[in-house]
Amino acid sequence: MPLFRKLHDTLGLKWRLIFGVSALLVVSSLLLSMFLLEEFSQTATYGLKQRGSSLARNLAHNAEFGVMLEISSELDGLIQGMLTEPDILFAQIYNRDGVLLSQGVSKGLSMSAVTTTGVNLTISDTTSETGHNVETRELFIPNEVECIEVLASVVSHKPDVSKEELGSASTAQESHIGGEIIGYVRIAISTGETKAKIAETRQMIVYFTLLLVMLGILLSVTLVKMIASPINTLVEATELLASGDLSQRVHVQTDAELERLALAFNTMCDSLEKTQKELELHNQTLEEKVRERTQKLEEVQKQVIQSEKMAAVGQLAAGVAHELNNPLGGILGYAQFALEKMSNGQLPEKDFNAIQRYLSDIELQARRCKMIVKNLLKFSRSSDKMEFDLVDVNSALEETFVFTSHQLGMKDIHLDVSLQPSLPKVMGNVNLLQQVFTNILINSMQSMPAGGDLKVTTIFNPPVGEFGGAVEIAFTDSGVGIPEENRNKIFEPFFTTKKVGEGTGLGLSVSYGIIRDHGGDIKLDSVVGTGSTFTVVLPIVRETARITANAKS
């Protein structure tokens, strides 16, 4: 079976059809030939037995008088007449006691061969229309002559009728059928001629079967080619069509079904070619539309990010103003005191040293104001392009704390900073990352209206297997926490639990989008009444991670 299945899978449709039709034709022809041969053999053998039975009955009928009187000369004449039949091998006549009264053999057969064959005069009770019991048996003579032995009883007919019944046809027939067995007739009819005819017929059937099979195979090959050739053409065209060649067309001129199939294929190709042209035109238009929409979305995204920056600046404005007010007050006081001392015209040495100290403090406070303004401008500046570079996360956090620390102090929030030193750098945009840090700090401040603790930590997760390593920044507050039903919504645009006017609902959504653009993630862990932890995960440059890991080891 595996070999047949492998052969079936290897051969094409045409050869499978040819082999299938041929096999069916061969099997059908063989079965028909066997049936015809068997039928002819049975018919010929039956005809031979019927002929032998008829000859035996005639001989028995004619030998009735000779057997009754045991007249050998008359019986010998009957025997010689029987031997004139070409297929009769021998004939014998016996009396009722089994004594041989007369016999004869055909030419070419010895009397000794006949006498050596056993004689069985037992006969069945089957009676023919003539009143003679007849039985046929197969017989083999020692000279390897096959024949059929026919044994018939010789019956003496004694009519026993009344005077009234004498002369009637029915009475004569009944008296003819009844009678006493007075002897037996035994003949042997040769089966050679019949077997020769059977052999000749067998040979003719074999030749006829071979001719029929050859003609059938030739016809099946022709028919299969007529059917398979257009199908192969369609298959080849379909394969080319599947590879992208829509110019394929098929022309079939066989029968109506295949012509309809070819016409449907050509119609499909026309439709596909037309659709492809429409799609190409549509794609060109679509690409232009997508490009325009993408540009608009990028502009809108930049506007949203910038608006969130300005919203954060607005929320930090009071703290930044206070941060600037303190050093500016000192600068103003020191400048006024120095001017007062210098208005006298001459400065004592002790006043000169004091003014020098004042000017030093003025420079220090001015630098502090400059740094605050610089960081605030840097944070609020709009970037046309999202340019990525190596970023020191610890430095970005410290710059963010500059303009947020005072706001935290005003809210009575204690800031605890624990930054792991020598963190590997990440690839990102420092301005956008500071916006994320600021949004999370503001969100933590708003979750602690009565004050609390805010802890910011950074750690390095070294690479393991496919994981290339990351820097994690955790913001842990002691605020009110986030209910479980809101945890899956806080990063959605415009979702907020604040009162109207206190927030846009875009801060965390924008932050999440920025971190995803950096290839990172923001995780949330919150317990209602205890606080929340926002963890920003930023992938690091693999080479930097390897150097940092080696340095630690």
Image (tube, rainbow, N blue to C red):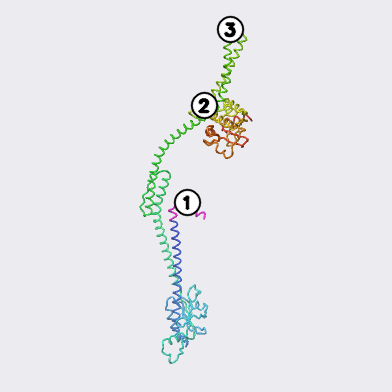
The magenta stretch is 1-17
Upstream in sequence: badge 3 or badge 2: 3
Residue receiving disc 2 = 380
SS at badge 1: helix
Query: Percent x, y for residue 2?
Result: 52, 54
Of 176 and 167, nearer the camera is: 167
Of 515 and 133, nearer the camera is: 515
Query: Percent x, y for residue 126?
Result: 49, 80
Residue receiving disc 3 = 346
Tell me the chief SS of the magenta region: helix
Query: Percent x, y for residue 239?
Result: 42, 46
Upstream in sequence: badge 2 or badge 1: 1
Q: Residue at x 52, y 35 (%)?
A: 494
* Whole-number angstrom distance, CA of label 1 to CA of label 3: 115 Å
Q: Nearer the viewer, mark 2 or mark 1?
A: 2
* Whole-number angstrom distance, CA of label 2 to CA of label 1: 72 Å
